[in-house]
Image (cartoon, helix red, strand yellow):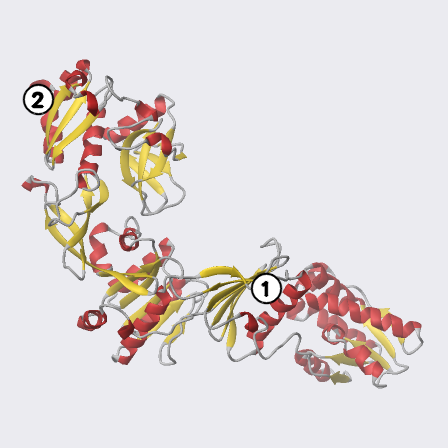
Amino acid sequence: MNVVPDTSAVVDGRVSERVADGTYEGAAVLVPEAVVGELESQANDGLESGWDGLSELKRLADLADEGTIELEYVGERADGDARSHAHEGDVDALIRDIAADRDATLLSSDVVQAEVARAKGIDVEYVEPVARGVVDELPIQDFFTDETMSVHLKTGTKPKAKRGSLGEMRYEVIDETETSEEQMDEWATAIVDLARQSNEGFIELSDDGMDIVQFRNYRIAVARPPFADGIEITAVRPIAKTTLDDYEFADELRERFKERKRGVLISGSPGAGKSTFAQAVAEFLNDSDYAVKTMEKPRDLQVGPEITQYGALGGEMENTADSLLLVRPDYTIYDEVRKTNDFEVFSDMRMAGVGMVGVVHASRAIDALQRLVGRVELGMIPQIVDTVVYIEAGEVHTVYDVTTEVKVPAGLTAEDLARPVIQVSNFETGRPEYEIYTFNRQVVTVPLNDEGGEAESETGVGRIAKREIEREIKSVAHGHVDVELKGNDEAVVYVSEGDIGTVIGKGGGRISDIENRLGIEIDVRTHDEKPSDAGGPGGDERGANGQTGGRGGQVGEERGTVVQPEITSRHVVIDVDDGVGETVEVRADGEYLFTATVGRGGEVQVSRGSAIAEELEDAIDRKRTVTVVPAR
């Protein structure tokens, strides 16, 4: 009897199994070289199937040495192109040809291979494939307790877990025995296979070195070398199931959601309970007869069966959004909104009339809103997001109402400085806490105090005004400039004796222009007229390495990131790399130049010909070190 096993039968160990039960005793086993080549390729790629197949070939060699079977390697080895197209049937075709030429029985666990061989008149023995590594339950289930949010396992380390209640999580060792590579490999393989073959699980992402598995309410990331420096398993699950009634402002939030379709950002730090709150919102909206869908990658929100959870279609959330617009949901829960592309998709769907609830990582409530700055037009923000909910330790900490109004910003007085202002008000008190607007071509976020919205001299619009005054004066003065605010609309500027005339200008024209632009009355004096305790050349002037008028702090302590500005025909461009939408300060040798918001391309662009650009180009010409630091 001649038997030709294909790759699937060799990997599953079916040949030696049938020799052991007497079916193939004394048979001539003809192993195609194409099978050997495919197994070798799989083993080189680190696939367990390749190593299992090579182990089976060793067992067959031992059986041949004992005289139980005859073993022969036949045919030609498949070339690299054939192996790369193995899933298209090239290797299978070579194996079938050998079985036909040798008038042998083809042994296979591949149903497609078996059916094609039968169609060609080849004698076939089909055996069920082996379910490799399949278990009924999660192999790391025992590491979880009622208070365990996540389990963290890695080769050569002690198992750890995050346990406790929301806001009081402890990252602790849960087993004193270090896990071996063999144990980690067994767990990792079992988890992935379980997700593939269970109706309660699926593979969210599978790439070289990384698998993201969703099994029941567990989200599990399995990382392997070379992507990671060792096998690592991180399993996360929600530890709380809540309803909107469990949170503060529940009645007010319910009415707010029902009033009209909203644009909401749910913000908070990792592990604060953002997704748990989002689930409660989704369930409430669904119970209130709204059509609710989710956009998630991975899909791990714990919602009812009536709420359909969508992943990234074709790997792109834009495709998911296009599909959802055809489905026409009333509300969509977007978990998580992180990258610029996510904010753009969120904004597009909101502007299309869909109620949107986005989950955003942020350390403060206002930071969630600032992440939109630079990604969408400033005036569109209140139309995209009208509510910000900040979650801390599983509770609703702050709710902001976002509106827009044409007004004079708080802290300024000149009526001709009126402009569109985004007001961020505390939902509980109704008082504005922040204003966002364009100030002298820069987008600024100004915190307001509790006394009716007037800006504080050093933390609100006063600080920004101080910087802008300093920048304007420095654009014409050659020596040191110091600025002292006297109120919301009055300042004293100290300059060198020789700069007085230049700063004031002919007939006071230059200083009047600056006053009109900024809406602040400016008194120009020399450094000699400055009180000794205020600093300056006669007091505490430290230039680039000490205290600057534009900062009011120790610049030397914040060295920043060194950048190389590029001068083009129209702009001076600073590549910031990251931090789109963030507010940054640009400095030269530690001395404050200006404040800017990082644009969509991760760049700060300054139009040539402006005072800012001239100051920056002068710093470049003088080979001063230009740095960028986050604005405080």
- Secondary structure at badge 1 equals loop
Corner quadrant of residue 157: bottom right
Question: Is 368 on the left or on the right of 26, as rendered?
Answer: left
Is residue 382 shown to the viewer in this render?
yes
Mark 2 Cα-neighbour bin, 10 Å: few <14, some 14–19, many ≥20: few
Question: Is 313 on the left or on the right of 479, as rendered?
Answer: right
Q: Which residue is drawn at 26% across and 63% down?
A: 264
Q: Position of residue 563 (x, y in %)?
A: 40, 33
Q: How far apart are marks 1 and 2 (CA)?
A: 77 Å
Is residue 323 shown to the viewer in this render?
no
Q: Where is residue 211 in the image (x, y as percent from the top left)?
A: 55, 64
- Secondary structure at badge 2 equals helix
Q: Quadrant of the N terminus?
A: bottom right
Corner quadrant of residue 32: bottom right
What number of labels is visible? 2
Q: Which residue is drawn at 28% across and 35% down?
A: 606
**On the image, numbered disc 1 is attached to which residue?**
175
Q: In which quarter of the image is the C terminus?
A: top left
- Indicate which disc, 1 or 2, sits on the residue closer to the N terminus: 1
The numbered dot on residue 371 is none
Q: Which amino acid does label 1 sit on?
A: Asp
Question: Is 120 on the left or on the right of 567, as rendered?
Answer: right
Q: Position of residue 471 (x, y in %)?
A: 22, 29
Q: What residue type is labelled 2?
A: Gly
Q: Residue at x 9, y 18 (%)?
A: 506
Question: Is 275 on the left or on the right of 493, as rendered?
Answer: right
Q: Residue at x 81, y 82 (%)?
A: 18
**On the image, numbered disc 2 is attached to which residue?**
508
Give the label, 1 or 2, closer to the camera: 1
Corner quadrant of residue 82: bottom right
Q: Which of 219 and 512 is in front in this view?
A: 219
